[in-house]
Amino acid sequence: MNKILTLYDIEFKRIYKLYFSMLFAFIAFNVCVVVAGLINVVFKVSARLGTNKSIKILQKASSARIIREDVMGDIFTIMCMAFIVAIVICLLYAFVIWYRDFVGKSKTAYTLFMLPNNKFDMYIAKLITIVFLIYGVIIVQFLSWIISAFVVTSLTPVTLSQIIDILQGRLSFSLLGFMQFDGISFIMINIIGIIISVIIIFTGIIIQKSFRKVGILLGIGYIVIFCMINLYVIAYKSHSGQLLMYQTVCYLITALVSMGISYKLLNKKIYL
């Protein structure tokens, strides 16, 4: 366990400055989206009423109506898009975290690959790194929502319950299954689902590096097939009863198969 934590520390120190900068930029972007939306309301209402532009305009009933009917939904959609981009960046780094070691043969990780030890420890360390990066983005996203809701409720007559009702009624909210708020769905998608996704990507990379000529096709094929299977399972919004059991079994099979393949290839066949 100490070795895994040491390897994790090595991995995280490579990226932490850029990562925390990205999180700060992510929060700043979300706050700016909210502020821009409210400023837009001020301009619209002041133009309609023929009054001076002032933050006090946000307290008017007409401003609250515009915020409820249009602005909050647009703000949430933009924030969701930014959230997806941040998650995609973390998943792309799941590729970088391996190929950087394969290419940079002077690095510590490459040296560890060459030693006669259990290389699966590196797999676990890299998995923990990527999963924690994504969890950090999710936490920051929820923090951004809280900040945004506080700003809106502080400056306008719109209440928190109205904001929640607006978000739940948006089509984008129902389509983005990984942004559910109920406990079981959150665990199945935001916690377990993320781990399974990273495991699939890691295994596809290792497959690619283990077969010289057809590795790319095999790796891509593995990622596509297992991602499609798990996305099909996640597509059902209900995470209860017999369906929950099927989803759990699918996750377990994916994890066992992927990690089993990765363990064998890392210790027996991988080409550096």
Image (spheres, rainbow, N blue to C red):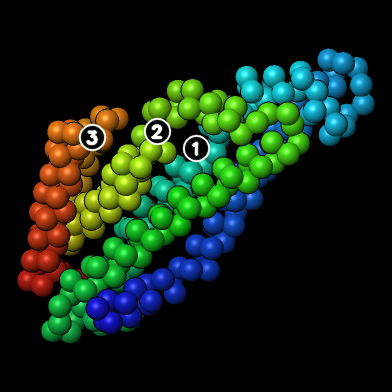
**Residue closer to the observer: 146 or 176:** 146
For label 2, the crowd category at 10 Å Cα-Cα, with few meaning under 14, some 14 to 19 and many 20 or more, is few
- The image quarter in which residue 269 lies: bottom left
**Residue closer to the observer: 192 or 181:** 181
For label 1, the crowd category at 10 Å Cα-Cα, with few meaning under 14, some 14 to 19 and many 20 or more, is some
Residue appearing at x 58%, y 30% in the figure: 161
Q: Say whether residue 201 is visible.
A: no
Q: Which one is earlier in the sequence, the residue at label 3 or at label 1? A: 1
Quick one: quadrant of the C terminus?
Answer: bottom left
Q: Which one is earlier in the sequence, the residue at label 2 or at label 1? A: 1
Residue appearing at x 77%, y 20% in the figure: 61
Residue under label 1, please give it. 80
Relative to 192, 81 lies left or right: right
Residue appearing at x 28%, y 54% in the figure: 195
Q: Which one is earlier in the sequence, the residue at label 3 or at label 2? A: 2
Q: What distance separates the C-alpha of mark 3 from that of mark 2?
A: 19 Å
Amino acid on which the number 1 mark rests in the picture: Cys
Residue under label 2, please give it. 176
Relative to 83, 126 lies left or right: left
For label 3, the crowd category at 10 Å Cα-Cα, with few meaning under 14, some 14 to 19 and many 20 or more, is few
Residue appearing at x 64%, y 50% in the figure: 28
Q: The residue tagged with tag 1: helix, strand or loop?
A: helix
Q: Position of residue 162 (x, y in %)?
A: 60, 27
Q: Position of residue 222 (x, y in %)?
A: 15, 47
Residue under label 3, please give it. 240
**Quick check: marks 2 and 1 in contact, CB under 8 Å?**
yes
213 relative to 114, above or below: above
- The image quarter in which residue 209 lies: bottom left
Image depth: mark 3 or mark 1 in front: 3
Relative to 49, 268 lies left or right: left
**Residue closer to the observer: 197 or 222:** 197
Q: Residue furthest top?
A: 48
